[in-house]
Image (cartoon, rainbow, N blue to C red):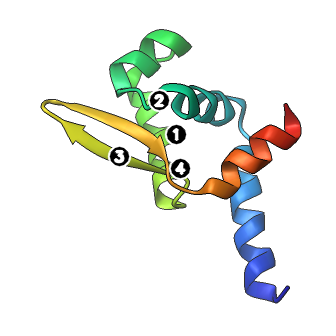
Amino acid sequence: MELNMFQEHARLFKALSHPTRLHLIGLIRDRNPCVKVLEEELGVAQPNISQHLSILRNLGIVEAKREGNQVCYRIKNPLVLKLLDAIS
């Protein structure tokens, strides 16, 4: 692997190192939920969830889709699913 690949993997691991983001990814993996559902499941304030989702979006881990006035999320990077399987 070349240096760029290692740098990309390091960014991915850094993003996944936060417990709330790991929990979000687990919930998104199972259901493709909207932010309101994530807020209810995690018991975390919406601004905090949005901040974590922004990090995951910027790294290409998840992607958002607007459905009416809701924003729902799904996993974009399949490598994340493999990593989740490895640590489960």
Mark 4 neighbour class, 10 Å CA radius: few under 14, some 14 to 19, many 20 or more: many
Q: Are marks 3 and 1 in contact (CB under 8 Å)?
A: no
The Cα–Cα distance between marks 2 and 3, rounded to whole angstroms, is 16 Å
Task: Identify which residue is drawn at 41% across, 26% down.
Answer: 33
The Cα–Cα distance between marks 3 and 1, rounded to whole angstroms, is 13 Å
What is the three-letter code of the residue carrying label 3?
Answer: Ala
Kindly identify which numbered label has been placed on residue 56: 4
Q: Are marks 1 and 4 in contact (CB under 8 Å)?
A: yes
The Cα–Cα distance between marks 1 and 4, rounded to whole angstroms, is 6 Å
Image quadrant where one finds the N terminus: bottom right
Nearer the observer: mark 4 or 2; the answer is 4
Kindly identify which numbered label has been placed on residue 48: 2
Task: Identify which residue is drawn at 76% across, 67% down.
Answer: 9
Specify whether 23 is left or right of 52.
Answer: right
Quarter of the view holding residue 23: top right
Kindly identify which numbered label has been placed on residue 62: none
Disc nearer the start of the sequence (3/4): 4
Q: Is residue 46 visible?
A: yes
Quarter of the view holding residue 12: bottom right
Reading the image, the residue beneath label 1 is: 52
Q: Position of residue 39 (x, y in %)?
A: 43, 17
The Cα–Cα distance between marks 3 and 4, rounded to whole angstroms, is 10 Å
